[in-house]
Image (spheres, rainbow, N blue to C red):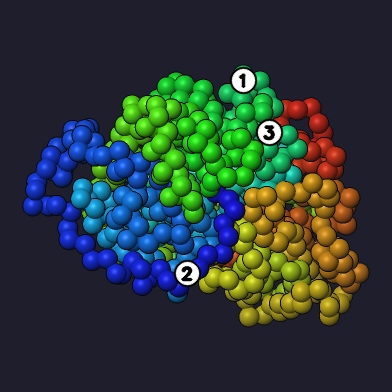
Amino acid sequence: MTRHRPLGLSLLLVAVTAVAAPPPAAAAGLPYQDPTLPVATRVADLLARMSLDEKIGQMTQAERGSVTATDLTTYRLGSVLSGGGSAPSPNTATAWADMYDGFQRGALATPLGIPMIYGVDAVHGHNNVVGATIFPHNIGLGATRDPALVQQIGQAVAEEITGTGVDWDFAPCLCVARNDRWGRTYESFGETPDLPSSMSTLVTGLQGATLGGPTSVLATAKHYLGDGGTTGGVDQGNTQLSEADLRAIHLPPFQAAVQRGVGAVMISYSSWNGVKLHGHQYLITTVLKGELGFSGFVVSDWNGIDQIDGAAGFTAAEVSTAINAGIDMVMVPTAWKTFISTLRAEVQNGHVPMSRIDDANRRILTKKFELGLFERPYTDRSWTSTVGSATHRALARQAVRESQVLLKNSAGILPLARDNNKIFVAGRNADNIGNQSGGWTISWQGSSGNITPGTTILQGIRAAVGPTTTVTYNQRGTGINSSYRAAIAVVGETPYAEGQGDRTGSMSLDREDLRTITTLRNAGVPVIVVLVSGRPLDIAAELPKWDGLLASWLPGTEGAGVADVLFGGYAPTGKLPMTWMNSVSQQPINAGDGQVPLYAQGYGLTY
């Protein structure tokens, strides 16, 4: 998902509540409305009743800021999404549920009463919703080496998503990040295919053992294929690899997800050897649907079909190329009316065969039936109270604990004593929920500050110590002296997402962070660096001056999990999901490439 612009949010609730629809033709008792019939029978019956316009509508996904409930009725739209940061006002779980139900009423007011499916990027918790539990980003979950925990997280996220009505999650990202310059590195579970493959348990967590459970949410394996392997780590770039290497490195996590029954696959913006994936019939139809046996539906990324020819504004040729390549649903956030009329013309002039339109609809409708949307189209509000619940936050705290990777511990400086201690805390990431959560948090790129409820790392430290321990905080380190037993510098990156997160030059700590650490060191106190970042950073030159180093990644809202490790409530067990460079000149650096790293993939100390 990308390029989410701020959207007008206020007119929506007026628009969605204006449509009060009757229940979908229930009295007719048509075969597709009979839940006792097999799904395939219901799909075949419904498909036989659908006009071309209804079929094209099912293949169209519009952004909530560019569509009304009445539009869903008029244009028979099959899906709506929220781009990153696109939320109802107020941004509460209940307002999301009200918004969802309003759109759904519009969908059910159509003659055939086909429910819409609503998609969001809940990539580390239900992260567009203020108050939701924000879990560590995937790079931290990869460090846990705990697929069972990741499945539990999927289940918890599904509960929070269900409580807002939403039924489709654009997750997990199963990319294999091969160059830490890439701004989406934190969305990868690891640099070798075994890690993302093992963490495909998230699919089972989100969907349940089979679709249709009370909190079953459709999962999406993304971005197919090779998004983490682009030359230079350039977002949406060109992955230049032999087919053998593409299959060996980037395909296995998708194979694992398909074996778990993942409902949707999202196509990557990137190219493979110069050919855009959004038009790649061989990789989408021959390999994914044919060879891997993927039976769900394929969705484009945000305006992804518009990139096939490299010029702005999608053309008829791009539409027919994408659909014929095997894309079933097209994410056209704003220009969805143009897409509908263009696809209709491309079918009518024979450029897109009806068999392809029917196949796309069969795949989409099958998932809607399997999810139980025809029987339970509206929000199940019994789950709304789970958004940000204490149970889910406790699970997130466990994930934070397990994701911490201890890289250096000179003279056993860690764990710190809880009692009779005097500790100084500094650094711009010590007391900042936004920074510790990273991108894809409340807004697309994320932002610094108190953006959603949670526990900062500093708050976690204060809560972890006993009454005889002093904790002093100053962001820049001002006020430290030699009476302190230890100093903790919480430094690293500030939030970013795709595109804006690409680092083409230096990958070192910036001047502010280095100045803070120097201030602490000059007091003659042991310094423990807690690195909050979406990737390994270039720190080898600074490391000799540090007594301890803890890689915290992007822990999310439950900063107490970091303190659990610092004070020995939990011995660190995390292992590096990525190879840690000796210098930025080594990028890309990956396990088995013969380069000498600062720390190898899999490295991690304990107490």
Q: Gap in Å between the C-alphas at discs 2 and 3?
A: 36 Å
Q: Is residue 383 visible?
A: no
Pointers 1 and 2 in contact (C-beta within 8 Å): no
Residue that carries the numbered disc 2 in the rendered image:
9
**Picture coordinates of residue 470 (x, y %)?**
71, 79
User: Circle 2: is it few (<14), some (14-19), or many (20+) Cα within 10 Å?
Assistant: some
Pointers 2 and 3 in contact (C-beta within 8 Å): no
Rendered view: 583 above or below 326:
below
**Horizontal side of residue 223 vs 10, given as left or right:** right
> Which of disc 2 and disc 1 is earlier in sequence?
2
Label 3 amino acid?
Answer: Asn
Q: Residue at the spot x=49%, y=51% of the render?
A: 335
Residue 153 is labelled as none
Q: Residue at the spot x=61%, y=20% of the render?
A: 243
1 vs 2, front mark: 2
Q: Can residue 334 be seen in this view?
A: yes
Rendered view: 333 above or below 588:
below
Q: Residue at the spot x=69%, y=69% of the render?
A: 430
**Horizontal side of residue 519 vs 250, given as left or right:** right
Pointers 3 and 1 in contact (C-beta within 8 Å): no
3 vs 1, front mark: 3
Label 1 amino acid?
Answer: Glu
Q: Residue at the spot x=40%, y=53% of the render?
A: 80
**Picture coordinates of residue 257 (x, y %)?**
45, 35
Residue 238 is labelled as 3
Label 2 amino acid?
Answer: Leu
> Which of disc 1 and disc 3 is earlier in sequence?
3
